[in-house]
Amino acid sequence: MEFLFGQAAGQGQQTGSNPLVSLLPLVVIFVIFYFLLIMPQQRKQKQHQKLMNSLQKGDRVITSSGIYGVVANVKDHVISVVIADGVKVDFDKGHISGKIEAQKAEPTK
């Protein structure tokens, strides 16, 4: 065990340890978590908020439950979505997961 603690522990001498050195691994772990987990989540939330603010009548959307539809009305926190002829459903704005862009029809060969 002497090789782990050095000769100072074997001789009964105590060496002073810098408290910053003992906190360094925790700081490094926090920085790694910030760049791998926190920062991407914040970026995703900003993109979703931008999407919510840009929704307009006539936009094709998909909800978090997988329902496709066309926005009929936008209020503060509620969006009315037409999912079929004569079927209008109200959703909370937070449950709209994305906007469907109009795709150009490509000629088949």
Image (cartoon, rainbow, N blue to C red):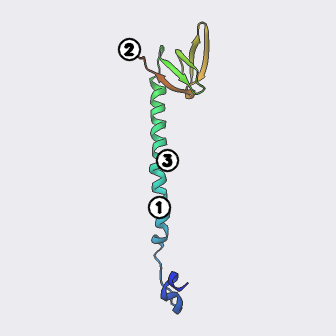
Work out whether 18 lies above or below 13.
above
Judged left or right of residue 86, residue 13 is left
| Observer able to see residue 94 | yes
Decide which of tag 1 and tag 2 comes sooner along the chain. 1
> Which amino acid, by three-letter code, is at mark 1?
Val
Closer to viewer: mark 1 or mark 2: 2
- As helix, strand or loop, the secondary structure at mark 1 comes to helix
> Which amino acid, by three-letter code, is at mark 2?
Glu
State the residue position of label 1: 27
Decide which of tag 3 and tag 2 comes sooner along the chain. 3
Closer to viewer: mark 3 or mark 2: 2
Image point (45%, 60%), residue name: 28
- Give the position of the N terminus as an image quadrant: bottom right
Dot 2 alpha-carbon crowd within 10 angstroms: few under 14, some 14 to 19, many 20 or more? few
- As helix, strand or loop, the secondary structure at mark 3 comes to helix
Dot 3 alpha-carbon crowd within 10 angstroms: few under 14, some 14 to 19, many 20 or more? few
State the residue position of label 3: 37
State the residue position of label 2: 106
Residue 5 in percent (x, y) is at: 51, 82
- As helix, strand or loop, the secondary structure at mark 2 comes to loop
Residue at the front extreme of this rendering: 109
Closer to viewer: mark 1 or mark 3: 3
